[in-house]
Image (cartoon, rainbow, N blue to C red):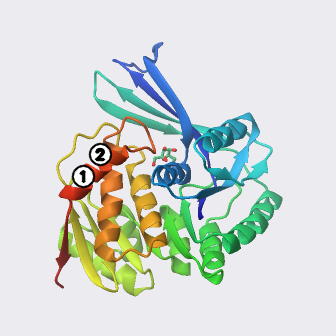
Amino acid sequence: MILTITLNASIDKRYVTKGAKQGEVNRVLQCEYTPGGKGLNVSKVLRISGADVLAGGFTGGYAGGYIEDKLKEKGINCDFYHVPGESRSCINIWDLETKQQTEYLEPGFEVSPADVNGFLDKYKKQAEEVSLISISGSVPRGVKNDIYKELVDIAISSGKKVILDTSGELLEQGIKAKPTLIKPNTDEIKMLTGKDCLDTDTLIEAAIRIHEDGVAYVVISMGGDGSLLVSKDGVFQAIIPKIQAENTVGCGDAMIAGFALGLSQELREEELLKKASAISAASAMSIKTGFYEPEIMKDIYKDIIIKKINR
Ligand code: TA6
């Protein structure tokens, strides 16, 4: 069983519009609601991949109940800490005329110190019972910036591999506990190492530094140029075939799900990176967030090339 932690779960609402204008009444042509927040996208992709998933974190109110009902319909077990507020919504707008994607991410409810302590008590028990832990996304108001350091420490003390996918101060604090895997973007690498990563060599050097500071796997996503994985066994690059992307929202979360699955299966670097890259690419080809077609993933998987980069 893989535990996913989403401290700021949301109802993701995807709108399709045509020529939407600020300051005017715009009618939405299509809309789709699904459980969201980075950790729940990871949960949904893990489930499609056949993994047993336990989803934890904070939910609240009617919206929280909707989120959990929809997760259970997908066969995802839920054990959230319930708070008085309403879980948030995150809006993702795709405009057919401008071909632009715009996101509005609500901040979410505020939690109290008692809520945080109640969640931590629940999380400590969960960490003992699961095989691997994946922590993603932003946190609600009332949660301190070092929360992920505390969660990673608990995971490691429980002898579990732990993935941390977040940004800013949450990542800067969380990395002090030496999570098993992180997937920083170039802004986050600059924050962590002070290096402006303008080219692949600098990117690799920065990732090696983060690895040498204690993170077993450092993943760098380079969008259409594929991704890099740095570990004790070296530097690996995944080169993916050209794809027709339909919705890139959540494909980073899908990649995290692929790594969680692969680490739980004890895969070696080449296989680990190939599977995660194929799942992420297949996810980008789906209009839905936190979803991929297994047949499409298998097709892409066959065409992914993994190169070991000599350093
Ligand atoms: O990565 C995509 C996404 O998970 C959206 O689905 C939306 O829920 C947003 O990011 C939430 O990000 P957060 O970091 O607040 O969990």
Residue in the foreground of this view, choosing between 156 and 209: 156
Distance from Cα at disc 1 to Cα at disc 2: 6 Å
**Residue 295 x, y percent position in the rendering:** 32, 46
- Residue 296's label in the rendered image is 2
Residue in the foreground of this view, choosing between 96 and 286: 286
Quadrant location, the C terminus:
bottom left
Q: Amino acid at mark 2?
A: Ile
**Residue 184 x, y percent position in the rendering:** 39, 65
Residue for point 35% across, 69% down: 272
Q: Quadrant of residue 124?
A: bottom right
In this figure, which residue is indicated by the disc labeled 1? 300
Is residue 246 left or right of 25 when viewed as pictured? left
Residue 106 in view (yes/no): no
Q: Residue furthest right?
A: 114
Secondary structure category for the residue under label 2: helix
Quadrant location, the N terminus:
bottom right
Q: Is mark 2 within 8 Å of ligand 1?
A: no
Residue for point 72% across, 53% down: 80
Q: Are marks 1 and 2 in contact (CB under 8 Å)?
A: yes
Q: Quadrant of residue 10?
A: top right
Residue for point 32% across, 75% down: 269
